[in-house]
Amino acid sequence: MATGLIGRKLGMTRVFAEDGTAVPVTVIEAGPCHVLQVRETQAQLGWGRKTPIRSSRAALGHAKAAGLDFAPQVVRSFPLDGAELALGSTVTVEIFAAGERVKVTGTTKGRGFQGVVHRYGFHGGPGSHGNTRHRKPGSIGPGTDPSRVIKGKKMPGHMGDVRHTELGLTIIRVDAERNLLFVRGAIPGSKNGIVTVAKQGGKSRHD
């Protein structure tokens, strides 16, 4: 069986534990995903549906080999856990269980061009007494040696819109009828953003 699913982030809400504690969760519509290809250690899954006019002949042919008459919107590969998978079969949220640790990968929100205070958390300069460098980075390079800005220096620039994986998230609830996963905490991306949910497989920084 595949160890992950493709889905989209619906938003955040809260659920209540048995002792009445409010738990913040992110709701993910995960799957159902069709199996497009099976290799020795991985399975290629497809999620969603592209319109024929937006589908290439290569994508349609690849999907047709798995018994599908449409090209999936998103294609991703996940490791196998030993169980066999048939081409064209469907993988649903039932591969997950409440209390299981997962990792979620998505694209973070784009913040545009930002300064170092917002981008990296610089403190900036004093706020009074004639200071004019409230949110500026300060000196960015040595003088005589090496007389240049060192590579990797934290500078103003484009922030966000990058691939990010959040580890050590716990599944609070699985709704198989509506293909929903309730994951504790926040995940990267905006509403309706495409994400992948995979089993943790090992320790995270939260263990």
Image (tube, rainbow, N blue to C red):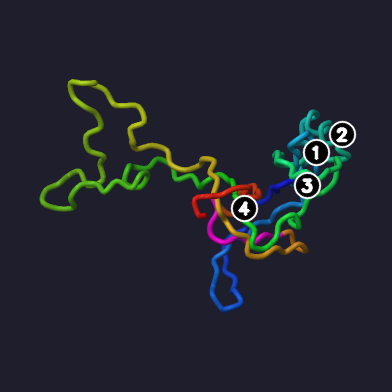
Would you name the residue on which mark 1 appears? 36
CA–CA distance in space, label 4 to label 1: 23 Å
Q: Is residue 39 visible?
A: yes
Q: Nearer the viewer, mark 3 or mark 1?
A: 3
Evaluate if marks 3 and 1 touch, with contact meaning CB atoms under 8 Å apart: no
Is 8 displayed left or right of 110 in the figure?
right
Marking on residue 167: none
Q: Tag 3: residue type?
A: Met
Circles 2 and 1: CB distance less than 8 Å? yes
Q: Which mark is residue 65?
A: 2
- In the rendered image, residue 195, in percent from the top left (x then y), is placed at 63, 48
What is the spatial separation of the Cα atoms under label 3 and label 2, in whole angstroms?
20 Å
Q: In the rendered structure, which disc, 4 or 1, sits on the residue that comes first in sequence?
A: 1
Residue at the (78%, 41%) spot, across then down: 51
Q: Which mark is residue 102?
A: 4
Magenta residues?
180-188
SS class of the residue under badge 4?
strand
Q: Which label's residue is closer to the chain start, 3 or 2?
A: 3
Q: How many marks?
A: 4
For label 3, the residue is 1
